[in-house]
Image (cartoon, helix red, strand yellow):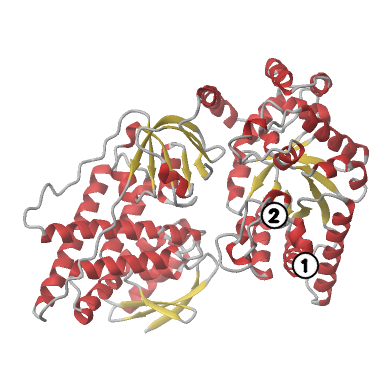
Amino acid sequence: MKGIGVSPGISIGTARVIRKTAAALTGILLTNESAIPTEIKKYDEAVGAAVKEIEGIIARGAASLPPESIEILEMQIELSGDPQIKDNVVQRIISDKKNVSDAFIEVIRDTVEIFSNMEDEYMSARAADIQDIGDRILQHLQEARATTAAASQPDLLAFGPDTILIADDFTPTDTITMDTSQVIGFATRAGSRTSHVAIIASARGIPAVVGCGDELLLISNGDKIILDSLNGLVLVNPDMDTLAQYRLKKLAYAQQTDRLAGLKEVAARTTDGEVITLLANIGEPDDLDQVFEKGGQGTGLLRTELLFMGRSSFPTEEEQFEFYKEIALRSGDKPVIIRTLDIGGDKQLPYFGLPPEQNPFLGYRAIRICLDREELFITQLKAILRAAAFGNVKIMFPMIGNIRELRSAKQVLAKAKTALSREKRTFAENIAVGIMIEIPSAAIIADWLAKEADFFSIGTNDLCQYTLAVDRMNEKVKDLYDPYDPGVLRLVHNVIEQGCKNNIPVAMCGELASDPLATLLLLGMGLREFSMSAPSIPFIKNIINHNSIVKAKEVCKKVMEMNNSKDIITYLQEVQP
Amino acid sequence: MIIKDYTILSPEGIHARPATTLIKLTKQFKSVFHLKKGDTVIKLNSMLNILALAAKNGETISIIVEGEDEAPAAAAIEEFFTQQIKNL
């Protein structure tokens, strides 16, 4: 299953699932007024005990905890004694006659809900802090009620070797009070890049994949897990082949990370002097930090879907403009290729209400929707055109299958420009317009398309699944999905050659671009721009810098003469340096 | 009563660290502190309320200080919003 990889690395281990039971309301009401002061006193005592406990954690952990954790704990002390929370609790006790733990559970539930719904990602992640102090205070409230209070301090959770922790989400207390010395990975159902677990995992250098969705909760204790946070993947009970493959990957990653960290400032250049451009695929402005940290030279693919997902209506032109502008500004003179909306297929928007289709990948998606619903398309194009005035922005249409679609999309772009001129807006009149090559028909007529597009970017994932007629989400046929199939490679080769002949840049932004096995072959085909997830950049750069175009051309020539992918893969593995 | 406007200089806005520091600062004085952002006014003693404002870098807020030690309190606020916050 797929989530967001937050701390790069690969871990292979055993699942330990942490489940929590939600606190239950008792429904018991106070019978007379005199109970009110007692309930409030219980609350103050529970808060006092909770604060003491957190102070204790800070004191014990001052030397060993990362500064981020101390900060979080200090904020939690303030949150525990928060006068606003107390006011809300007291009000429920006084006016609704609730007992203190019911009142408190309700206040925390409401507050958590408010924070979870905040648009600011950082703030919505703070819901975990509120839940955390809520749980802690509640524990003290309920201890006070039980007459035979058992051991008050829960044991430090201990785990066996190579544990990968699986949970809905981890609260700060979880991550801080667990003995993580044996923990080699985290995976959560909820969460984002700014969740606690992300912060802690990065600080400790443990791979983590967050936001995996409900599927994650199907994992049981003892399941074998591969956590690949480089690609945001969680693999459950993998077969022997996959396991072996990942052991090698893990080893290679460990050996290379140290060495590759030094490559950041080094240009990607083959031993015979050909300069290669390495770009990154991103989804939001914050991804750029990692891109530049890994030595990426710009954005080869900005997926705009993120901006449209997780909300209740379409983003306005202004909202989109701000989003694109931030990326353009943060990129300076580095290129930013913005792909227009690519929904449909496996990416649905609840508020768009697209009916389910028999064959979504062959259905109403991407540019087909945009050309049909021109008002949506124009809004996005206007926002991109305006943002392009702030940086080196280019526009890219997905799922172009023929010349007519490209021309229609360009006509809508012209309309967007006219509208902006009429509104007297500043925008980039001469924005470059490229297309994704991901439909076989487009790859076959690349020579014609090259005369009307400013650049190509090959999307190997869709190109492969459409060429081979294989749905790679379908368990039964996914083994047939093979980017090294000679048919697929011929199409890729043709696109690159036609781009070169017509003097337009050709990039690749599909998964093949980040596959070290394919680098030489692609260089040999003439590809000079690779776009991939940022953590892969140093690896591909390393291969480029140790090989020559002469060798790459030889490899390409040999591969293109092989009629099956098994031979091709074996050969590529042999010629790998 | 002393009222003054500040632009938020911390790169991440008023997140956990600046908010914690700010609350600790106000506890050193007897004065009552309020923060106003747009139409919302909150008392500066609640972490919850401060975080709920989600004040971002570049936004403008007003701080209202009132009480017997409001002069030194406002000076401390000034120092916080013009200098200290940059490093938080």
Mark linked to residue A342: 2
Q: Quadrant of the C terminus of chain A?
A: top right
| Secondary structure state at the residue bearing disc 2 | loop
Mark linked to residue A374: 1
Q: Position of residue A304 (x, y in %)?
A: 66, 56
Q: Position of residue A342 (x, y in %)?
A: 69, 54
Image position of B55 (left or right of A294):
left
- Above or below, A416 against A215 in this view is below
Q: Quadrant of residue A154?
A: top left
Q: What subunit carries mark 1?
A: A
Residue placed furthest toward the top: A574
Residue nearest the observer in this picture, A238 or A156? A238
Q: What subunit carries mark 2?
A: A
Would residue A264 be seen by someone viewing this image from the given angle?
Answer: no
Q: Position of residue A370 (x, y in %)?
A: 75, 62
First along the sequence among labels 1 and 2: 2
- Identity of the residue drawn at 27% across and 81% down: B68
Image position of A415 (left or right of A139):
right
Q: Position of residue A524 (x, y in %)?
A: 81, 26
Amino acid identity at mark 2: Asp
- Identity of the residue drawn at 11% across and 81% down: A33
Image position of A496 (left or right of B59):
right
